[in-house]
């Protein structure tokens, strides 16, 4: 059994109970939908940002424990099964790349039986975005039949549209400016900025669908609508830009990329 398959469940099992106590205020109540007024009364701006970060990390570790534990058991039995967690949130440079690596076996099923029959990536950007929105809506209702999760799915479906358009423009074989951009020294920074925006969207999506919901996001917006909040945002964005840039370098050095799953 490979070391990463056997060791990851053990390490994640140890770190998962400890993580909620590492962030001030405790991220678990927020991730479970703690009332936002109580949360805002307990946390300052920096602690709130740490809470958002820890909530996403906790969600990732939870699934790593489940999926890699049973993958290790399957490998020990001679079965090489799908790696469901190909990368964590900070090892991605786009929303689409993240979802291709999250619960990958389920993603492949969705692509084959839902996304492609709906039109897939063969049509226009508008058609591709509409297909993505329907797929996310299905995934939301698959999790739980609730208005909050349905809104989560529709928001993710809509927010993928600018990324789809940008991807087509940048990787266009007929565009001279796109070719120059891909070959320029600025291109890694462009990828890092896109990855930072993707991480932000994933964090807010987690809060919207599995955390405090629309009311909580509204309360957060009021708290960060100040000079102190703006400074906190800039520092938070700078931190993520550095992390995503480093992870992009690591990914490139390893030759790692979450590819589109074969049908």
Image (spheres, rainbow, N blue to C red):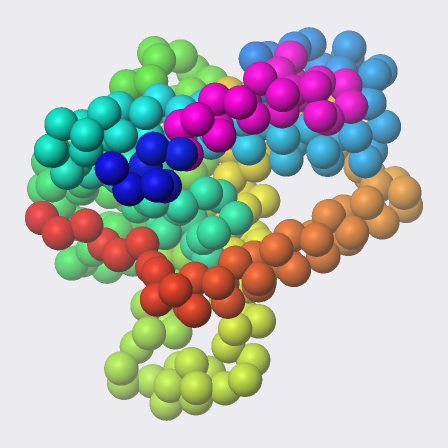
Q: Which residues are magenta?
A: 8-30
Is residue 222 rendered to the left or right of residue 253? Answer: right
Q: Is residue 143 left or right of residue 191?
A: left
Q: Nearer the viewer, residue 201 or 108?
A: 108
- Quarter of the image with the N terminus is top left
**Residue 24 location, quadrant:** top right
What's the residue at 32%, 25% (across, down)?
A: 69
Q: Is residue 143 visible to the viewer in this orientation of the structure?
A: yes
Q: Position of residue 70 (x, y in %)?
A: 26, 24
Instruction: Give the mark count.
Output: 0
Which image quarter: residue 224?
top right
Residue 21 painted magenta: yes
> Which image quadrant for residue 232?
top right
Residue 84: where, in percent of width, then height?
Answer: 29, 36
- Vertical placement of residue 93 versus 150, above or below: below
x 84%, y 15%: residue? 41
Q: Residue 55, position in %: x, y?
A: 59, 27
Which residue is at 56% across, 36% downward?
203
Q: Residue at x 72, y 33 (%)?
A: 50
* Residue 16: in magenta span: yes
Q: What is the residue that sits farthest to the right in this orientation?
A: 227
Which residue is nearer to you in this view: 66 or 198? 66
Task: Name the main secondary structure of what is drawn in magenta.
Answer: helix
- Answer left or right for 65 relative to 50: left
User: Visible in this render: residue 215?
Assistant: no
From the viewer's perspective, is residue 241 above or below residue 224? below
């Amino acid at each position: 059994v490979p070391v990463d398959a056997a060791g990851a469940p053990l390490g994640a099992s140890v770190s998962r109970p400890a993580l909620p106590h590492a962030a001030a205020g405790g991220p678990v109540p927020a991730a479970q939908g703690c009332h936002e007024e109580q949360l805002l009364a307990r946390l300052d701006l920096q602690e709130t940002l740490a809470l958002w970060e820890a909530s996403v990390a906790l969600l990732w570790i939870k699934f790593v424990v489940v999926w890699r534990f049973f993958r290790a058991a399957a490998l020990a039995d001679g079965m090489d099964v799908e790696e469901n967690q190909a990368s964590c949130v900070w090892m991605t440079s786009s929303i689409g790349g993240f979802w291709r690596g999250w619960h990958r076996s389920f993603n492949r099923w969705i692509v084959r039986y839902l996304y492609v029959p709906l039109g897939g990536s063969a049509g226009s950007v508008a058609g591709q975005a509409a297909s993505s929105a329907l797929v996310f809506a299905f995934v939301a209702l698959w999790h739980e039949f609730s208005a909050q999760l349905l809104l989560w799915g529709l928001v993710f479906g809509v927010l993928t549209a600018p990324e789809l358009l940008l991807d087509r423009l940048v990787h266009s074989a007929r565009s001279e400016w796109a070719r120059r951009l891909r070959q320029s020294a600025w291109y890694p920074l462009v990828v890092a900025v896109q990855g930072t925006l993707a991480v932000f969207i994933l964090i807010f999506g987690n809060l919207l669908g599995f955390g405090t919901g629309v009311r909580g996001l509204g309360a957060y917006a009021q708290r960060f609508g100040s000079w102190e909040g703006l400074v906190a945002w800039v520092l938070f964005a700078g931190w993520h830009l550095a992390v995503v840039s480093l992870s992009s370098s690591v990914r490139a050095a390893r030759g790692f990329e979450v590819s589109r799953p074969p049908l």
